[in-house]
Amino acid sequence: MTTVPFDPAFDRPPEDASTPGEHTIPADNYLSNGHSISSWLLTVDHKRIGILYLISITFFFAIGGLAATLMRLELATPKADMFEPDNYNKLFTAHGVAMIFFFLVPSVPAVLGNFLLPIMIGARDLAFPRINLLSWYLYAIAGAMAIVVFAMGGVDTGWTFYTPYSSTFSNTNVVLAICAIFIAGFSSIFTGLNFIVTVHTMRAPGMTWFRMPLFVWSNYATALIMILGTPVLAIAMLLVLAERLAGIGIFDPRMGGDPVLFQHLFWFYSHPAVYIMILPGFGVISEVITAFSRKKVFGYSFIAFSSLAIALIGFLVWGHHMFITGISTYGGMVFSLLSFLIAVPTAIKIFNWIATMYKGSISLDTPMLYALAFIGLFLIGGLTGLFLAAMGMDIHLHDTYFVIAHFHYVMVGGMVTAYLAGIHFWWPKMTGRMYNDVWSKISAVLVFMGFNLTFFPQFLLGYLGMPRRYAAYPDEFQLLNVLSSAGASILAVGFALPLFYLVKSLWDGKVAGPNPWGAAGLEWQTTSPPPTFNFDETPIVTQEAYAYDDIRADKLGLPRPENKGHH
Amino acid sequence: MMSVLAQFEKIEPFRLFPKQASNFAPEMDALYFFLTAVSLFFTVLIFGLLIFFVIKYRRKHVDEYPEQLPTNMVLELTWTFIPLLIALVMFFWGAKLFVRMSNIPQNAMEIAVTGKQWMWNVQHPTGKREKNELHVPLGRPVKLRMTSEDVIHSFALPAFRAKHDVVPGRYTEMWFTPTEAGTYYLFCTEYCGTLHSGMVGRLVVMGEQEYAAWLTNSVADEAPHLAGAKLFEQFSCITCHGQQAPTLANIYGTPRRVVRGGKTVEVFADEDYVRRAILNPQAELVEGYPPLMPTYQGILTEDQVNQLIAYVKSLNDTNSSRPEGRPVDAAPMPQGAIVPDPAAASGPRESVMHVDDGIVPFGSATTRPTTQP
């Protein structure tokens, strides 16, 4: 990368947000640069690949959402009256597989990270643009295989593929489903590899590690987990195949195997994968809270290091999924203690976000509404995680609806809400246009209310003992289940709305201009949509992240403060 | 004969908390309320701050950029260490309860449970069997020794706040002392295939006398150790054991020196060991014996294995010193053998039952309860 002389254009305050009407879409941008199908399918532009991911994961979100809707309809009555039990089992498997492997894992990293990470560090692209395209193709191939599996009658093992059920008992398309997940895993590994190399080697002049936005830090931590954890999932999946296809006894005790071994291998990936699914969300929320409070994020280095701490400790807590499988009590205690320790860096983040808002200038634009919803819902998700980390308590709650409620508060209330906050925050950057303000706020409120109505009753159901993955349940659980199903219908509307107003904005949305929110950050200093190589000239970074004090000084005509904080 | 069925309560009406029906339920609920109280406190605190800040610091005009504040290290450390302390309290409380729930008392009555797609088979010490139901007497510690014929299941008793996975290829254990008579749910909570949600049964807690009556209410099967003795003959185990193969008397509950993977190691002869020795004898050969025994994997059912284990346990000389428990490993094990033990009737060993309470010793071949107290 060549360094150009310092250009004051990249060190100027963001444009005034009060006169967006004056903006025009720049003639030369990454969207206008080729309109043919091949210009998309053969692109190596990280922004276009981000858009490809956006479209594909939206498709899988719709499939997973459809499965969830059908499940909630079935669960509105105690009897299994809509689906055969086998079909219900296939539904929750489809829901889990689509949502976890094809939506949540790629969501923020592959869409927003792909689009923003190079821009945020002043790079022209990711380090390996072709590998980036390959990773999308792997995702697409894996996704197509998953669709084939669903179309051929589905798979009934649950997204967790516990052995020996998956390896020797299930009569469904386990092999193809496992191949799909195996391939999707490589898509994730390539994305992680790309992010790590990019952050290490492609930062613009002056973009030191501690000037990087927290979104970059959190995606960097995520990338570490992706390349260290995903291979273990791939191995576990291959071993299931070996037992299923070749009869090599690994997990089935009838062949000398150990069924619990699979759970160790599976959760060695899948617990860190929870952090793959939530750390990038933390990054989004850090960006949104600071932008809509116009305050430098409170405790930058605490948040950055807590991301790394979570990524590391996250590898050592998998056993908390297995307290009641008969693992050793002392082993379980280590897992329990570490699970409590990982709660601390998470708590630090929440307090820091709140402190960022203190004495800020808070505006309740749609991204901020989603971010506030995130804090509230993720807080409840995190606190209820403490219940499950407490070994004794977990005995009663394990495999009940309490667990379902807990991880939906984290994954949906947390990650999906963060993803929507990010999409609404950066949509003007990605498309150059603003979406409908009223409808988007309605959607944020519907998601928050519908979500709570759907999942809060499930905590109560869980303590009552209602097991997960039940198509039919005892009569006295019905009231809470009806509340949950009613909430799900509100939630579905909340999730469907953005599809309409976001797509509509592409045609008639107000032109956004480079910086509609008046936010700091390199991505707001290039045009919307950005040019193909992000910046007309390589930026030279002279400011720390979130330099709202400089913007304030410029607005007030004062000299910029001396203290630049992090070096 | 008095009808014990008349005493069954109707299954619970709608409620927010399950009934407390075991010794663990009040402890579990106390921890639950503590965790809920802490969670409520932080939820109210954070939601309160969010709402307060959003109102108080709302943007007044579009060009407003507030004054920046420095990071406050004291504040950072405060909200690092307070959550850490609270987390540690939760950890210790949770671990303590877990240890209590995994330390099975010596005098617990042992009931065998076998999970199978999609039903529960239960066998009481007297040999009495039931399907998808578990009858237990009030006020006495009960230990369930569980295994699965096929996939992983999980035996969940919400009213007891007790649950444990049931894993094929090994025994897992759980215990409780029922404290409240009634009928409660028994669920399978580990997904096990097509009729997982149909693998639901009833847990019936009865007074000791009713339980004794229920046991005699119908013809019981043969006591497991007697059935085991027959199997021992039927499969000609008797031909080798004692000669080319080790004698089985007094091995249960003792350390055994075995060759595993070419190395001599000491293992503890518990139920899991006996089970492995039957199903996969070559993997752990007793030191000094030739590898003669064939595997019985796929030949014996879980029930039959269970009966053979009961038989081996019944061969223990009642006067021999009881083991002091497992030498290693954290998973707490009962100290010594547990009923059924036919020697209870003839030997001097202290019976865990209270004969003068009108309950006769279980597992005794000669004194099976025959009459109503």
Image (spheres, coloured by chain):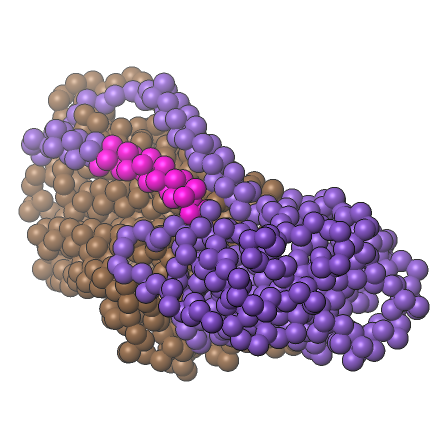
Is residue B157 within the magenta segment? no
Residue drawn at x 91%, y 63% is: B289
At 36% from the left and 37% from the top, the residue drawn is B34
Q: Nearer the viewer, residue A244 or A550?
A: A244
In the rendered view, would you say A298 is above or below A221? Answer: above
User: Which chain is in brown here?
Assistant: A
Q: Which residues are magenta?
A: B24-47
Question: In which quarter of the view is residue A375 placed?
Answer: top left
Q: Is residue B45 magenta?
A: yes
Q: Residue at x 88, y 75 (%)?
A: B239
Q: Is residue B213 visible?
A: yes
Q: Colour of chain B?
A: purple
Tell which of B57 and A192 is nearer to you.
B57
Percent coordinates x, y for residue A203 in the rendering: 41, 39
Q: Is residue A229 above or below residue A201?
A: below
Residue at left 75%, top 76%? B231
Q: Nearer the viewer, residue A151 or A204?
A: A151
Compared across the picture, whether A72 is left or right of B79 comes to left
Q: Position of residue B211 (x, y in %)?
A: 50, 62
Quarter where residue B237 is shown: bottom right
In percent of width and height, residue A557 lies at 14, 21
